[in-house]
Image: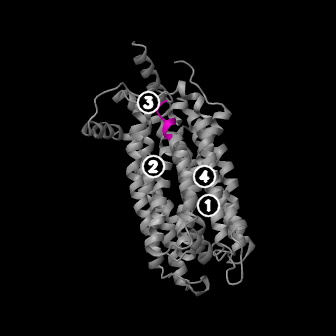
Amino acid sequence: MAELRKPGLATRLAYGIGGAAGGIKNNGFEYVLLLFYSQVLGLSAVLVAAALWIALLIDAVSDPVVGYWSDNLRTKWGRRHPFMYVGMVPVAIAYFFVWNPPSELSGAQLFAWLLGFTVIVRLMYTLFEVPSTALAAELTQDYDARTSLMSFRYFFGWVGGLSVQIILFFFLLQPSEGDPAGFFHIQGWHTYGLLGASCIFVAVLITSAGTHRHIPHLKAPPAPRKLTPLKVLGEIWETVSNPSFRALFIATLFGLVASGISATLNQYINGFFWEFTSDQIGGLTFAVYLSAIMALALAPMAGRVLGKKKAAIIIGLLAFTIAPAPVIARQFGLLPPNGTEALYFIVLGVTIFDIALIIAYQMLAASMVADIVEQNELVTGRRSEGIYFAGISFMRKLAQGVGILSASFILAVASITPGMRSSQASDEAVRTLGWGYALTLLALWMIMIVCVNFYRISREDHESNLRALAERENGS
């Protein structure tokens, strides 16, 4: 088998930087949009949630459409890049306007503004995200090089999203009398929208232009054929019926529900369970930079030494048992008391190491999706990178809300109500919160790891698939 092309550092950086666009968009929509529109602008939290859900559902449906379309598009700029260029400007403009609504809007008008621009952001970003992630399977067929590509993608996703959010809270929101956190400093939010939109545009541009020179070497679409809606659905179903894809698809469902619970309850665990100060929580946030750097080195190395599936399972088991371990240890009185430096540094150390493992797992799992492409091509004769990455994106969007709802149920069982301060929560409420957080995450993550175990493509299988495709192409 001929030596496979491996992308150089410039290509890996260009491809990876595109992840920052998704990190910025996701952090904004998932962590602070509700705060801005509900607490600051006064729109009902129910209406904000409704706008986010409607936009999410519309966007989720668009994923397989864009994925299938980009698998079959025939242009002089290839299958993927026309979509990436089309979405670049509209997504940045729409993201800016999400955070800059006219001051006179309120009620139904403000809801319509939020819904309209949120839908545009999600749809235009899908035009970039699905085709660009699919490029990982086209830029190289090398087993380890794909892990490196995805590692850069996730690294910039975490760092990009985190950086813009830190700038918002530490520099743009100016505290004032009666507003110590600066949440009601409207100009800070407007600047945040401009900064986020500009960074999204630059990230999309760098990935699109930086990978443009590879277009002549990318895979061609299938031969023109007569397509009917029924035939399109049949081809999509044939593609997603791959057993390894089903394993990752279901694993992604449980993993993302767990991620939604973790993200929603994280501040409650830090504030109510550990009783950390705002400065301490800020330190935990900054520590994610170190975690991302560690993951960037760990994921490719583990994939080379152990193979992707085994590495993902081992790293996942470590990550997802370590994450709730401090909470469980506290329940049995095995950690220093709240308010001590010893407790903070224990949690800080565990957080740095654990998030590095979680990011490394995500990198490996994403690379595993790319390796399904050749196996499917042997069966169907078609390259379906777009459909596979669209399927994972589809599940990611639908699972987000389930995690948030589950977290709300845990808070209700623990009797932690809106407006309650940590000093007002009873010891029993805090213990219930801890058990609900730890055991729910542990159960969901273990189910996820079990699903990953059904993934069937090893390094040897991948190389065998490449040889079979090469023999078919050469007519032997």
Q: Is residue 248 visible?
A: no
Q: Is residue 253 visible?
A: yes
Q: Residue at x 67, y 76 (%)?
A: 181
Earlier residue among tags 4 and 1: 1
Q: CA distance from mark 2 to mark 1?
A: 24 Å
Q: Name the front one of labels 1 and 3.
A: 1
Contact check, label 3 and label 4, Cβ < 8 Å: no
- The residue at which mark 4 appears reads as 357
Q: Which mark is residue 193?
A: 1
- The residue at which mark 3 appears reads as 374
Earlier residue among tags 2 and 4: 4
Color scheme of the displayed model: one colour
Give the extent of the magenta segment: 78-83
- The residue at which mark 2 appears reads as 393
Contact check, label 2 and label 4, Cβ < 8 Å: no
Q: Residue at x 57, y 41 (%)?
A: 150
Give SS at disc 2: helix
